Image (tube, grey):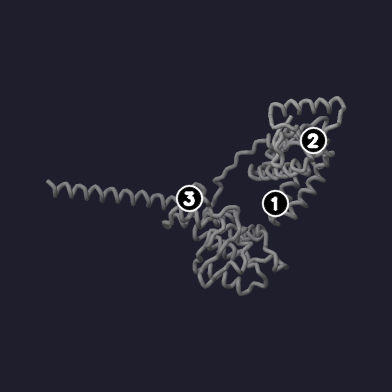
Amino acid sequence: MHVYKRKDSKYYWHKFEYQGVAYRGSTGTRSRREAEGIASKARLDVIEGKYDIKRQKKAPLFKNAMASFLEHCRRHNADRTALRYEASLKPLSEAFGEKPLNAVTADAIERYKTARLAGELKPATINAELRCLKTMFNHFVRLDVVASNPVTRVKLLTENNQRMRVLNFEEERLYLAACPQPLYDIAVLMIETGMRPEEIFRMRRENVNLDAGTIFNPHGKTKAARRTLSLTRRAAEVLRGRVDGAAGDYIFPLDGDPEKSMIRVDWLHLGALKDSGVARFRLYDLRHTFATRAAESGVDLVTLAALLGHSNIQMVMRYAHPQAEHKANAIRKMEEFQTAKQMEEARVSDLIQ
């Protein structure tokens, strides 16, 4: 039994399921206690065969609901979001496709999670699938197709959020030498600006100001993500060539369609790794490489947060990973400072005496 308030109503509403069918309705009261009593009476009416309350439509099969949800995503979300959802929902459809949507329970999802773990998949991959499933169920809860979201009762797996690689300069040289276009230019921009891959993919000519040596990123969920970045000479050289050769508005257009931005370069990245012999890393690690190099060169964390498009310093801490040599140098500098300070204090003391 679920009693709740809707944004468009001052009264409590009820939702419940009986024999696989979901029911909902307004209780007509602002008192939660009274609403719970009315909801219990409504459930009893259903059990006794009195269908004078609003009965929800029969839940569709999971595979049909998934197709409808993906179509909704293609209309209302960015292309990359729809593609990500499609990839995450494919294994879920194989598991639940022939089941009615309201027959997919929290227990069934837990069994799915266990089976996926047994397949030696990474927790992050499984969590992405569960988050996508949760989003899909929320969509159908809002449409009153199902009464509740079973994924809310499923705990996500613990992820290793420290899976980061920072390239040294020799690895960077070998990797870039193996990169075809447009991966080469994308990789250079990530290393030189710290921009996210999708920010570079969606880059438009109007946002590049080579005279001022800046680029503006208008995208992002937060104000901090929407930022202006100064360009290094290397980044400016890459963008100058891209701007001059652009057939449409996008700096990195989708192959065959200059009026759409590219979405991913995973296959090019994997090929460059294989050809270069560099130990495996994610494309996103080029952003970590930029952040670490910036921190080691003395860029303060507040400025680094602004460069990366983060709203607080705490988020920056996971991107800055000082190397062993850098940390050793820091200790030596501190030791030298303390020794010099002690000698200065001793000298002053001798003069006073």
User: Which amino acid type is marked by label 2?
Assistant: Ala
1 and 2 marks in contact (CB < 8 Å): no
Q: Is residue 196 above or below residue 59?
A: below
1 and 3 marks in contact (CB < 8 Å): no
- The residue where tag 2 is placed is 103
Residue at position x 59%, y 60% from top? Answer: 218
Residue 180 in sight in this render: no
Disc 1, SS: helix
Give the label, 1 or 2, closer to the camera. 2
User: Which amino acid type is marked by label 1?
Assistant: Arg
- The residue where tag 1 is placed is 84
Mark closest to the chain's N terminus, 1 or 2: 1
* CA neighbours of label 2 inside 10 A, class few (<14), some (14 to 19), many (20+): some
Lateral position of residue 338 relative to residue 31, left or right: left
> How far is disc 1 from disc 3 in space, using C-alphas?
29 Å
* CA neighbours of label 3 inside 10 A, class few (<14), some (14 to 19), many (20+): some
